[in-house]
Amino acid sequence: MTIRSTLLIFFLLMSLVPATILTALAFFQARQAVKIEIMQNLEEEASALMEQIDRMLFERLENVHTWSHLEIMQEIRVEDVDKRLSQFLLHLKKNYGEVYKTLYCVNAKGTVIAASDPSLVGRTPSGQPAWLTADLPSGKAYLEPLLLDRPNEAASLPIRAPVDDVFQAGELGNLQVLFDWTEIFRLLDKSGQNHIANDSESLALLFDRTGRIIAASAPLRRQGLLLSDQLASWGVRADQEPVMEDTGNALGVGKVLVGSAQSKGYQHFPGFGWSVLVVHPIAVAFAPIERMATAFILLLALTSVTAIGVSLLVAGRIARPIIQLTEFTRHFMHSQQLVDPPQSGQWEVGELTTTFTRMIHDLEKSKENLVRAAKLAVVGEMAAVMAHEVRTPLGILRSSAQMLQRESSLTAEGREMLSFLLSETDRLNNLISALLDCARPRPPRFRPCHLQAIIQRVTDLLLPQAQRKNIALTCEFNAATDHLSCDEEQMVQVFLNLLINPLQILPSGGQVIVRTQSSGNGLIVYIDDNGPGIDEAHRQHVFDPFFTLREGGIGLGLTVVQQIVRAHGGTIVAEASPMSGARFCISFPESLRTHAKAGQS
C-alpha cells in the first residue's frame, strides 16, 4: 500500500473505531444503569404501596371491630326504637367522608334494624360467607367477597364484626360496613402517575393470596382484569423474585419490568398474604436511552464524514511532500544531477525535505562540508551517549555562549539571543542543583553552633538587597540560650531560602522580622512578614516539590528547607503572621540544645 492509503486507513481506524466502541459502551452502560435504577424504584414503590394498603385495611378493620363493641350497639336488643343507633351510624359516615359507603346493623334474624341510609332499615340483606378472617389484636373481623360495580371504576368491600350481648352469652347481631374500595383504586392510580419514573405508563396491581387481581390501575381496570386470574403466574413469581422482567403480553404493552412486595401486615395485624406488583413498560423506560442512541448514531455518522474528509486532507498533505521528495531522490540517484528541489511541506515532513535538500547541496559543494558533517555526527553520537550527564552539555552551552559574546561582528540581536542562552543555562543549572539537593540531601554534620550568629550572618548578607527595596529586615533574639548542635552550612541555606522569598515578594516599605524564643520543648524561630501572606488552602502544600505561587519560581526551596529541618529532628510549618502576612515557624528539639551545652562545657 502507498503512504497515502496507509495514513488514510490509520486515521479512519483511530477516529472511527474508538468512537464506535465508546458509543456502544455508553449506550449499553446507560441502558443497564437505567434498568437497575427503575427496577429498584419499582421494588421500593411496590413496598410503599403494600405498606399503605396494609395500614388502610388495618384501620378499617379496627374501626369496625371497635364500633361493634361500643355500648350503643346494645340498641340492637330493642331494635333501635329511638333511632339512636341509626343516628350514630349516620354520624360515623359523615365524619369519615367517602371512606364508607354504608354502615348498618343486623340483628340475629338477619334484619337491618339501624343504618346510615334509612331506606335499608327492615331489609334482609343477602348473607355472604366470609371471604377472609382478620385476626386483630382486639378480636376478629370478617371480609365478605368484593362487590364490583361495572364498568370496573368502583367497588365496595363488605366488612362485618359481631356485636356481643353484654348481658348474656351470645351475639345480638353484626355491624356491617361497605368500605369504598375505590380508595384502593385511587391509591394505585396515584402511584402509577406520580411516583414511578414520573410516567403515567406505570401500572400497579393488587393480588390476593390465590393470585386473583382485586385492585389495579385504571388502564387495567378498563381491560376487565379485576377479579380475574390472568396474571396469577406473576403473583406466584413475586414470592421468589422481588423484581423481574416479563413479556407483558397479557397487558398489551410489550416487555415490562415488574417490582413486587408481599404483605407484611401492620402492627400486630398479620395481613392477608396479598401482594402488590408495579409494572413499567420497557419501551417507555428506555425511551430516553433510545433517543440518546439515535443522537449518538447521528453524531457518529457526522464524525465519520468529518473524519473521512479530514483524513483525506491530512493524508494528502503528509504524503504529497514525501512523494515529491522520493521522486527528487530517485532522479538524483539515477542522473547524479540536481534539479529544482520540491516545495517544502509543513511540520516534520517539510523539515525533512529542507534538510535533505540542503544535505545534497552540501555534499555537492565540497568534501570539507562532508567531513564537517561527519564530525558533527560523531559529536551528536557522543552527546546521545552522555545525555544523562545533564550538567556537561549545560556547561558546554554556557562556555560556547561566552566565547561568542567576544566576537565583535555579532549583531545586537545575536547578543540578545546569547544573553537569553546564558540566563536559561543558569536557570537550568540552578534547577538541577535544586533537584539534586531534593533527591540526594547530604546528611548534616552536627557540631555546636550559635544559632544567633548564623541568623545574623544571613541577615547581613541580605541587608543590602533589603535596603535597595526599602524593606526593613530586623532580628529579635529572645531565647535564653541559642546554643544548638547543627550543620552550620545547612542552617545558612535554611534561613537564606526563608528570607529571600519575602524579599522578592514584599513591596517597598515591607517588613521582615526574625525572632527566636525558648519553649519547654526546645528552641523556636519565627520568620514574620507583612506581605500578602499564604492562603490557608495552600499552606499545607508550600513544602511540596515544584509547588510555587511566585512567577519564575521552581518550587524546590521550601522543600529543601523542610528536608534540612527534619534531618535535624525539627519541624517547620507555614502559618498566618500577626503582621497580617506569612509566618514560618521552625521548632528545634530540646535534645539539640542539651547536646550543644554539653559540647560547650
Image (cartoon, helix red, strand yellow):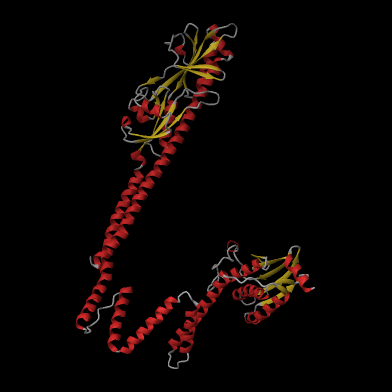
| Residue sitting nearer the eye, 116 or 378 | 378
- Name the quarter where the N terminus is drawn: bottom left
**Is residue 580 visible in this depiction of the protein?**
no
| Residue sitting nearer the eye, 453 or 377 | 377
Q: Residue at x 27, y 67 (%)?
A: 315
Q: Is residue 598 left or right of residue 550?
A: right
Tell me the quarter of the picture where residue 256 sits.
top left
Residue 263 percent across, percent down from the top left: 47, 27
Tell me the quarter of the picture where residue 325 sits.
bottom left
| Residue sitting nearer the eye, 569 or 264 | 569
Farthest bottom residue? 408
Q: Is residue 272 left or right of residue 480?
A: left
Circle count: 0
Residue 562 percent across, percent down from the top left: 62, 67
- Name the quarter where the C terminus is drawn: bottom right
Farthest left residue? 335
**Is residue 131 visible in this depiction of the protein?**
yes
| Residue sitting nearer the eye, 205 or 407 | 407
Residue 502 percent across, percent down from the top left: 62, 73
Farthest right residue? 601
Residue 339 percent across, percent down from the top left: 22, 83
Q: Is residue 216 left or right of residue 329?
A: right
Give the vertical position of 366 relative to 555 (above or below). Answer: below
